[in-house]
Amino acid sequence: MAQTGKPQQARINGQIIIDQLVRNMELGQFEMGYSVLVPCIFSIYLDPDDHKRLASIQDLIKEDAGRALAARLVQWNGKQPLFKRGKKQKLYRIARHDWWIEFFADSEDVVPPGDVEIHSELNDVPQPGYRGIKTTLIDRETSVTPARVERDRTLTRRCADQVFAEEFGYGLTSTGAQSDPSAV
């Protein structure tokens, strides 16, 4: 096959994204007295063409990524220290009930094709002065601003406190209490 003289661009794939998420989680550890928190909120920025190409399989990548992150936690929590007899190992955990992973197209054209930029936080409410670990696949300065990350997360976060429907009649109400069929 003839080459056009143009350098071959790296093609982003799910394994690269997952590897970078795990790397980001490792770099973002926050040690406490009895446990170690790791990031669980991830905003993934891709070149718009890469984002479009992966749009139909993002849920599958998120599912695999969540499994890989959880497996790393299990691995860390299963290790026993070699030279610290009788000393309890710190528990690795996340500050939420589950991982939050979301993909965004880089609308400012700062993430090159074939690259990924990941911004992470320890929990839903970032603490003042803590901005999380930023991971890029290629050695370059991060280009997505913290204000943009916050805006994108706010726009896509699911609101768990809203009730959209409630069942009446026989069965359970949304609160889990048995409903009274004569009250209908």
Image: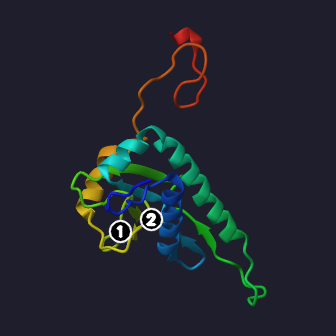
Residue kind at label 1, given as amino acid type? Gln
The quarter holding residue 71 reads bottom right
Q: Position of residue 97 (x, y in %)?
A: 54, 53
Per the model, the C-alpha gap separating discs 1 and 2 is 9 Å
Q: Position of residue 107 (x, y in %)?
A: 23, 51
- Residue 108 is marked as none
Q: Residue shown at 55%/13% (left/top)?
A: 169
Vertical order, 79 against 152 (above or below) = below
Which color scheme is applied? rainbow
Q: Residue shown at 26%/53% (left/top)?
A: 151
- Residue 127 is marked as 1
The residue pinned by badge 2 equals 122
Going by the picture, which residue comes out furthest to the left? 108
Q: Is residue 24 toward the left or the right of residue 107 in the image?
A: right
Q: Which of disc 2 and disc 1 is earlier in sequence?
A: 2
Vertical order, 63 against 42 (above or below) = above
Q: Are marks 1 and 2 in contact (CB under 8 Å)?
A: yes
Mark 1 or 2: in front is 2
Vertical order, 175 against 17 (above or below) = above
Q: Is residue 20 toward the left or the right of residue 83 in the image?
A: left
The quarter holding residue 125 reads bottom left
Q: Considering depth in this image, is 32 or 120 the residue closer to the camera?
A: 120
